[in-house]
Each structure stands twice: as C-alpha cells, then as structure tokens.
Image (cartoon, grey):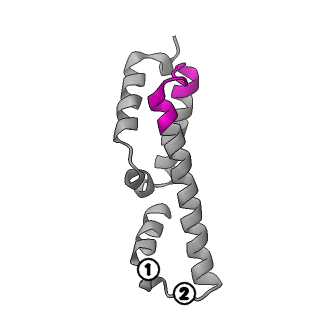
Amino acid sequence: MNTWSRIEVIQAMHSWARDMTPTRFAAGGLIDKFVWMYTLYMTAGHANVGTKAWINKAIHETGLWLHTAMYVLHYFHDAVTYHSIRIDLYPELWEMRAHLVR
C-alpha cells in the first residue's frame, strides 16, 4: 500500500477539501497552492479516489480559482501598466492582488 492510499491520508485530504474556500486559496502563497494541487493530484490518482464526488468538486473548484487568479493578475497588470488606471480606486482588486502575489 502506498502512502497516498492510507485511510488517514485520504481522510485528512477530505477534511482539507471541505475546509478549502476561494478566500483561503487566494490567501495562500505559491508553495501553499502547489502543495494543495499536488496533494489533490496524488490523492485522486494514487489513492484511487478520483471517482469520489468530493475530490472531483475540489479539483473543479481549484481550476476555477486558478482561472480567477490569472484573470485578476492579468487585469491588474494591464490596468496599472497600460491604462494608467488608479488602482487605489479599486480596493477589492488591490486586496485580491495582495493575496495572490506572495
């Protein structure tokens, strides 16, 4: 039995998946995001739980969160660099960027 197939690991990942939110994902740094996605990948594949609804939901949501992060970073870069938009007029965008760029 590989480590990823251990019941304790699967239960811990299931618990982590229940607790993960878009805000927590956005607030995490690059390493946090990598560990989250790597653990999803290993649990889904090597623990053979890829058909479970909870892991498919977590994978789908993670994809959406990554898409949102890319959009926000792209918009922020374009707004500040090319359009001279005063970012201080958009506090929610500034806050999202602060969480995403760590």
Q: Residue furthest top?
A: 1
Instruction: Give x and y (percent) for residue 86.
Output: 50, 88
Three-letter amino acid code of the residue under disc 2: Ile
17 shown above or below 63: above
Q: At 58% from the left edge and 80% from the top edge, which residue is drawn?
A: 79
Label 1 residue SS:
loop
24 shown above or below 96: above
Residue 85, numbered circle = 2
Three-letter amino acid code of the residue under disc 1: Tyr
- Whether residue 35 appears in this view of the structure is no
Mark 2: give few (<14), some (14-19) or many (20+) Cα within 10 Å. Answer: few
Q: At 49% from the left edge and 44% from the top edge, which residue is drawn?
A: 61
Label 2 residue SS:
loop
Instruction: Give x and y (percent) for residue 99.
Output: 43, 63
Q: Is 2 in the magenta? A: no
Name the residue tied to disc 1. Answer: 90
Mark 1: give few (<14), some (14-19) or many (20+) Cα within 10 Å. Answer: few
24 shown above or below 54: below
55 shown above or below 81: above
Q: Please identify the dominant SS of the magenta region.
A: helix
Q: At 62% from the left edge and 86% from the top edge, which residue is drawn?
A: 83
Q: Earlier in the sequence, mark 2 or mark 1?
A: 2
Q: At 44% from the left edge and 56% from the top edge, which residue is drawn?
A: 26
Quadrant of the image occupied by residue 38 = top right
Residue 57, numbered circle = none
Q: Which residues are magenta?
A: 43-57
User: Disc 2, disc 1: CB below 8 Å?
Assistant: yes
51 or 86, which lies in front? 51
